[in-house]
Amino acid sequence: MPGTLYLVGTPIGNLDDLSPRAAAVLGAADFIAAEDTRVTLRLLNHLGLKKPLVSYYQHALHHGAAILDRIEEGQTCALCSDAGMPCVSDPGEQLVMDAKARGIPVVPVPGPSAFVAALAASGQKTDRFVFEGFLPVPKRERRARLDELRGERRTMLLYEAPHKLCATLDDLRAVLGDERGVSVCRELTKLHEEILKTTLGQAAAHFAQTPPRGEFVLVVAGCEAPPPEDAAPTLEEAVAAAKALMDGGLPPAAAAKQAAAGTPFAKNDIYRRLVRPE
């Protein structure tokens, strides 16, 4: 019988946010696969636990096969990211896909999530949203992604590192405009937590003067709905328009034809009302 791969949500800052279930799963696991073993070791020390740790990060995906081999042999593995839920903007995504392909049981142990916390506290619309994670780094791919978001009407959530924040705000301004609403959420659940609801232009000006520190979530307002198209005229309005054309010198047939353009009514419908008013 294969073991189980547990996806353990870990605190995004405040260690008291770790759930009792997550602590129990970490304590019962045979080994732990961690994005950064140093970060996870601090969490284990906080819990008073000692467990074998295996590195699994973006440039060590080749470790995935060995991890899954151990699970197939019957061991239980807890997968942890540095903060939040594994597999969301996280290399654990590939490990889960490979585990599913092998028929290995995968069990989520829900925990904190930076983008969900930011959305809830942002003051932006929360009924519909899209999570974009980190924008691409190559300029061409980045521009293409931003162009895709230009007409996005849902609230958009992005992650960003402090040293890239100003450039990202400038890129967003260039595509979405200075007046687009944004909530800049910094160091969530930590001592210096800050949530600033403003516009992209004002946010860019603020952080140009105040060097960004900490990890950021940007909650960007979606674009406003396009104005509704003008309602189609009624038959009475189309007939009135035809009568005005007749007053200007057009014969009934020509007036009916011109008034019918752009309406759901046939020329003959309007013509009959012109020559035989009800």
Image (cartoon, rainbow, N blue to C red):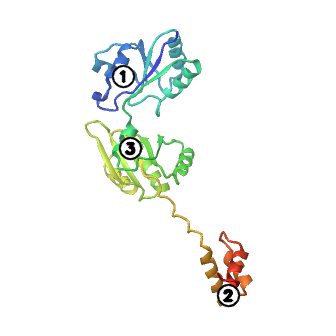
Q: Which residue is mark 1?
A: 40
Q: Which tag is nearer the camera, tag 1 or tag 2?
A: 2
Identify the residue shown where x is 50% and y is 26%: 59
Disc 3 vs disc 2: Cβ atoms closer than 8 Å? no
Amino acid type for the residue under numbered disc 3:
Leu
Q: Which mark is residue 119?
A: 3
User: Residue 251 location, x and y as percent?
Assistant: 73, 87
In the rendered image, which quarter contains the C terminus? bottom right
Q: Which tag is nearer the camera, tag 3 or tag 2?
A: 2
Task: Tell me the SS state at disc 2.
Answer: helix
Q: Which mark is residue 7?
A: none
User: Residue 50 location, x and y as percent?
Assistant: 33, 13
Circle 1 crowding by C-alpha within 10 Å: few under 14, some 14–19, many from 20:
many
Q: Which tag is nearer the camera, tag 3 or tag 1?
A: 3
Amino acid type for the residue under numbered disc 1:
Thr
Gap between marks 3 and 1 measured at Cα: 26 Å
Task: Tell me the SS state at disc 1.
Answer: helix
Q: Quadrant of residue 199?
A: bottom left
Tell me which label, 3 or 2, sits earlier in the chain.
3
Task: Tell me the SS state at disc 3.
Answer: helix
* 25 up-or-down from 232: above or below: above
User: Residue 9 location, x and y as percent?
Assistant: 39, 27
Which one is in front, 23 or 127?
127
Which one is in front, 209 or 81?
81
Tell me which label, 3 or 1, sits earlier in the chain.
1
Q: Which residue is mark 2?
A: 246
Disc 3 vs disc 1: Cβ atoms closer than 8 Å? no
Circle 3 crowding by C-alpha within 10 Å: few under 14, some 14–19, many from 20:
many
